[in-house]
Each structure stands twice: as C-alpha cells, then as structure tokens.
Amino acid sequence: MTLTTNRMLLTALLCFGTLSGSVNHTTLARFTTVVDSTGNQFSAGTLQIGSGITTGVLSLGNLVPGDTFDALLHISNPGTLELTYSMTTAITAGSSTLANTYMDLSVRTTSADCAAADNPPLYTGSLAGAFFGSPLHANHLTNRHLLPSATDVLCFTVLLDPATPASQQNTDMTAEFTFAAEQV
C-alpha cells in the first residue's frame, strides 16, 4: 500500500466517525410548565403558660415551728405548641434568714391532691433556693414537658423547721415563684 492510499483510508474513517457521532447529539428539546397553587394557608402556633391555685393560697401566717402547709398549683398549656417549663424562686420582701435557713419547700407532681403526691420530688430544700429545670434558652433536659391543652398539678409543701429559734418570731417574708416556658 502506498502512502497516498493509507492517507485516503484514514481520511475516510475520520470523516465517517465524525459524521456518525454528530447525528446522536444534534437535537435537544425541553418542555416546561408552571402551575399556580392557590388556597395555601400558614399559621403560627401559640405558646402560652397559665397557672392557678386551686386549694388554699400560698400565704402562710401564724406558723409555729414544725407546721406544714400544702397548696396545689395548676400549670396549664392552653396553647397549640408543646412547651417545656422551669421554676425559679426569689425572696422579694421580708426575712431572708427565715427563707434560707428555716423554711423548707418540697414540690411534687400529683394527679389529685397533696396527700396523693407520691411522685419523686421536683425540688426539695430551702424555700429561698427553690427551682426545677432551667430558665436558660434551649436547656430542655431538666425542664417539665407539657403538651398542648395539658395541665401539670404541682403540690407545694412548706415546712417551718421545728428548730426555728424564738428570734424568728413575728418575722415574715414574700417569695415569688417564676415559671418560664419555651417551645420545644
């Protein structure tokens, strides 16, 4: 074979390969359409916490050493979102010594009344330092969970230490319980 024949054969193969390859990729078409979706509705949920004292009031008077006092407090979630809540306490007036040293508080959940409060305590200790959970944002591990339309019944039991000295006679104090709720 001559050099010219080889060149012609190679040129013919190259042209044939180029023409046959371009046939496969010459046409591309896309169809698109747009549809309007009407009637969509978005609404935000509600986060709401409520409380109410159902038996007794958390006002203690004329206590003598060794006295105890029980009160039920209902914490409710009338909102539409699950929430977690915590409780903190502040002594806002009166004797901090009475609140720190001689008044003890136990907080438990119950299904009926304080006599039936057989659940483990959420808090037991000094009235002045009473807390459960954490009011810090996104710290849900120790907080109480409450579903929408649900209620927690809390039993508060206050004890005036039997060893309270006579120096605490005629003293009083005011404690404020703060319940902080956050969406789960």
Image (cartoon, grey):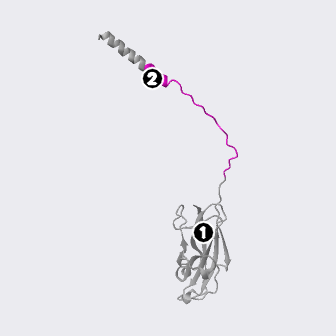
- Look at the numbered disc 2 and give the secondary structure of its residue: helix
Q: Which residue position holds label 1?
A: 179
Overall secondary structure of the magenta section: loop
Q: Is residue 23 magenta?
A: yes
Is 17 on the left-hand or right-hand side of 141? left
| Position of residue 46 measured from the top left corner of the image (x, y, whole percent) | 65, 59
The quarter of the displayed image where residue 20 is located = top left
Q: Which one is closest to the eye, mark 1 or mark 2?
A: 2
Residue type pointed to by label 1? Phe
- From the viewer's perspective, tell me whether residue 50 is left or right of residue 108: right
Residue depicted at x 64% and y 84%: 61
The residue drawn where x is 67% and y is 75% is 53
The kind of residue on which mark 2 rests is: Gly
Dot 2, how many residues are within 10 Å of its Cα: few (below 14), some (14-19), or many (20+)?
A: few
Q: Is residue 139 above or below residue 52?
A: above
Q: Give the magenta part as a residue range.
A: 18-42
Residue 59 horizontal/vertical position (percent): 65, 80
Q: Give whichever of 32, 107 is nearer the camera.
A: 32
Q: Position of residue 4 (x, y in %)?
A: 32, 10
Q: Is residue 10 magenta?
A: no
Label of residue 21 in the image: 2
